[in-house]
Amino acid sequence: MFASHPEADAMPTASPTACPALSRRSRSARLAGWLLAGGILLSGHVVAAEAFQSIESIRAAAQAFLDAQFGQNAHTHYNLDGIDPRLQLKPCTQPLGVTNAQSNGTGGRITLKVSCAGDAPWRIYVPVTIRQMMPALVLTRPMAAGTVIAASDLSTREINVNQPGLTYLTDPQTAIGQTVIHPMQAGQLLTQQDLGIAQLIKRGDQVTLVAEEGGVQVSAQGIAQGNGGAGQRITVKNSRSGDLIQGIVVDAHTVKIP
């Protein structure tokens, strides 16, 4: 025979209204259980558990990868184009992984793979546009075809150098002394296709033919048979012999026989 426990025998069996203190404790216990089922109870406050992976965390992981891969500076800008704000991905229990999944070959657009290798793995693909801004040469005034470019005719403007098919010049020395081959407007971007070599010698000009052999330089007078700029090959007629000689334009008065 078991002895009865005095406290157990004394346990009240009345309705909640018969024992208000016990009823309050029971309701508090049930309330705490409900709160804990939906979050974490800390210091009297409920902190709701993250239901889904935040879009901000995905964007931050992709941005950190881009900064590490391509550098972080004021001239490089990234647009993460394809993160759907309605995504409902399970929270990752590990740091997100980011890799370069695809490039279109121009450097202006790539696709990143953002993935989770945690308890509930997932992966998404995020297209990214990269804009790299660099100063390029532009004209400071309108120019007619054939106008020779001077240093004062040039300025710079920042452009996105990752645009497909874009050509541009950045060094003024590549343009100074050249001519524009068609009419151009002030502020227009200057490209190599806009330039032609300035014609230093014109057909009919008197020029000096110069040749060197064995350390000895020989010169003769001639008449240019065509137009030519520095480094271009033209034909010159020797004034004394009448021979036609090919030479390379050195300046407005000299043609060197190679």
Image: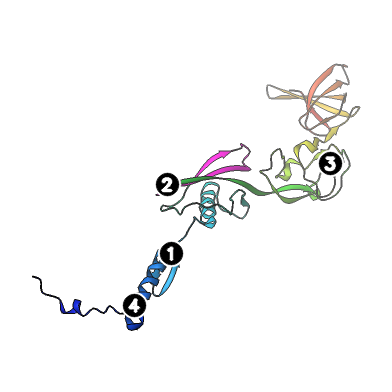
User: Which residue in the protein does label 3 denote?
Assistant: 148
Q: Which of the 4 quarters of the picture holds residue 162?
A: top right
Please report the bounds of the magenta region as a residue range: 98-121
Q: Is residue 100 left or right of residue 225?
A: left
Q: Nearer the viewer, residue 44 or 132?
A: 44
| Marked residue nearer the N-terminal end (4 or 2) | 4
> In the rendered structure, which amino acid carries the disc numbered 3?
Val
* Element type at mark 4: helix
Front of the two marks 2 and 3: 2
Q: Residue at x 54, y 53 (%)?
A: 59
**Cα gap from disc 4 to disc 1, whole angstroms:** 20 Å
* Residue 117 marker: 2
Front of the two marks 4 and 1: 4
> In the rendered structure, which amino acid carries the disc numbered 2?
Ala
- The colour mode here is rainbow
Q: Residue at x 85, y 43 (%)?
A: 184
Q: Could you tell me which quadrant the N terminus lies in?
A: bottom left
User: Which residue in the protein does label 4 denote?
Assistant: 25
Q: Give the vertical position of 129 relative to 247 (above or below).
A: below
User: Which residue in the protein does label 1 denote?
Assistant: 38
| Marked residue nearer the N-terminal end (4 or 3) | 4
